[in-house]
Amino acid sequence: MKTNSFTLVMLALLLGGCVQSGRVVQSEMTRDGVRSQVLLSEYFESRVRLVDEGLLAHLIVTLGKERVPRGQRVELSLSDRVFNDWIEEADEIYFTNESDRPLVLEDVRLSYFNGHLKLSEQPVTIQPGSYWKTPPAVKSTVLYRAARQRTLELVVDGRPYQIEMQERRTPVAELPRPRRG
């Protein structure tokens, strides 16, 4: 069976699309008819500060395989990856203790559609000036998904909190630059 060069080029482009970076281009048209484009990163973020407790919660959602732990897989077919734009998603929260006393966090949950992702099984003590990161909650999602309104539920030093967190897809231009050594 003969294969022409056009077929090979199309197959290479199709398979090249399987390695999704999680980045997308957002195009907008202004009222003046001017088109602008912004390259959006593979990260969604949201930050909220519990002033009374001295606790900062920083949600980071990563699209792609970057934050998927070794040995953990999300089963996605080649068809879903290429034709339906399905990709891995890892949700993590960094909690920073900005107070002058240890804080105990319990029952950390993050909304996910009509349910919750339980992000901590055991109580965690965060010392002043330090942070704790939840294990990543890994699942599949769509590459072009919109930002979501999330609800963070947790107990801090015995007091329950329910906090709204609005995700924002971070533009590539706002990502920290790697340090050159």
Image (cartoon, rainbow, N blue to C red):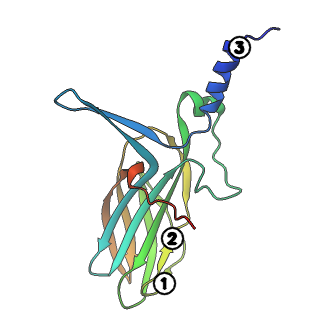
The CA span between labels 2 and 3 is 50 Å
Percent position (x, y) of residue 123? 50, 79
Closer to the observer: label 2 or label 3?
Answer: 3
The residue lying furthest to the left in this view is 31
Q: In the rendered structure, which amino acid carries the disc numbered 1?
A: Thr
Task: Return the disc, 3 or 1, that comes first in the chain's sequence.
Answer: 3
Percent position (x, y) of residue 86? 54, 37
Please tell me whether residue 6 is drawn above or below residue 70 in the rendered image: above
Where on the picture, by quarter, is residue 150?
A: bottom left
The CA span between labels 3 and 1 is 61 Å
Circle 3 is placed at which residue position?
5
Q: In the rendered structure, which amino acid carries the disc numbered 2?
A: Lys
**What is the quadrant of the C terminus in the image?**
bottom right
Task: Return the disc, 2 or 1, that comes first in the chain's sequence.
Answer: 1
What residue is drawn where x is 48% and y is 42%? Answer: 23
Q: In the rendered structure, which amino acid carries the disc numbered 3?
A: Ser
What residue is drawn where x is 38% and y is 55%? Answer: 174
Q: Are marks 3 and 1 in contact (CB under 8 Å)?
A: no
Say which mark, if any, is on residue 133. Answer: 2
Where on the picture, by quarter, is residue 102?
A: bottom left
What residue is drawn where x is 47% and y is 59%? Answer: 177
The residue lying furthest to the front in this view is 181
- State the SS at label 3: helix
Percent position (x, y) of residue 44? 41, 52
Percent position (x, y) of residue 11? 67, 22
In the image, 28 versus 109, the foreground residue is 28
